[in-house]
Amino acid sequence: MLPLITLTQIGIIVCIGVLLDTLLVRTVVVPALAFLLGDRFWWPSKPQRTDPPTDRELERQTVQL
């Protein structure tokens, strides 16, 4: 009888955790953070460059060093 009570308690705790995550975190906390942080919320905002730099850009980088 004791293992059945323990499993029931664990099941109820997991159920409460899933409901809290679904109803509170995903619907309130995440949108609030996105609103407060603005563009910083999307941290990889600048796409990586795929084309190689031109000679002029390379010269500019070496002059700055």
Image: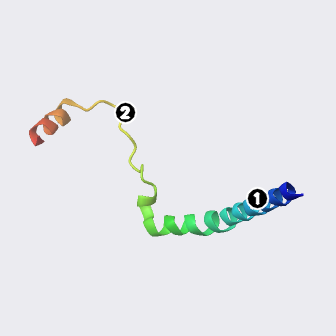
Position of residue 3 measured from the top left corner of the image (x, y, whole percent)? 84, 55
- Residue 40, compared with residue 36, is above or below; it is above
Position of residue 14 measured from the top left corner of the image (x, y, whole percent)? 73, 59
Residue type for callout 2: Thr
Position of residue 26 measured from the top left corner of the image (x, y, whole percent)? 63, 63
Residue ID for mark 2: 50
Q: What residue is rendered at 46% in x and 69% in y?
A: 36
- Display colour scheme: rainbow
Foreground residue among 20 and 11? 11
Please identify the quadrant where the N terminus is shown: bottom right
Q: Say which quarter of the image contains residue 51.
A: top left
Q: Does dot 2 land on a helix, a strand or a loop?
A: loop
Please identify the quadrant where the C terminus is shown: top left
- Residue 51, compared with residue 21, is above or below; it is above
Image-based side of 23 in relation to 57, left or right: right
Q: Residues within 10 Å of mark 1 (few under 14, many from 20)?
A: few
Q: Does dot 1 land on a helix, a strand or a loop?
A: helix
Residue ID for mark 1: 10
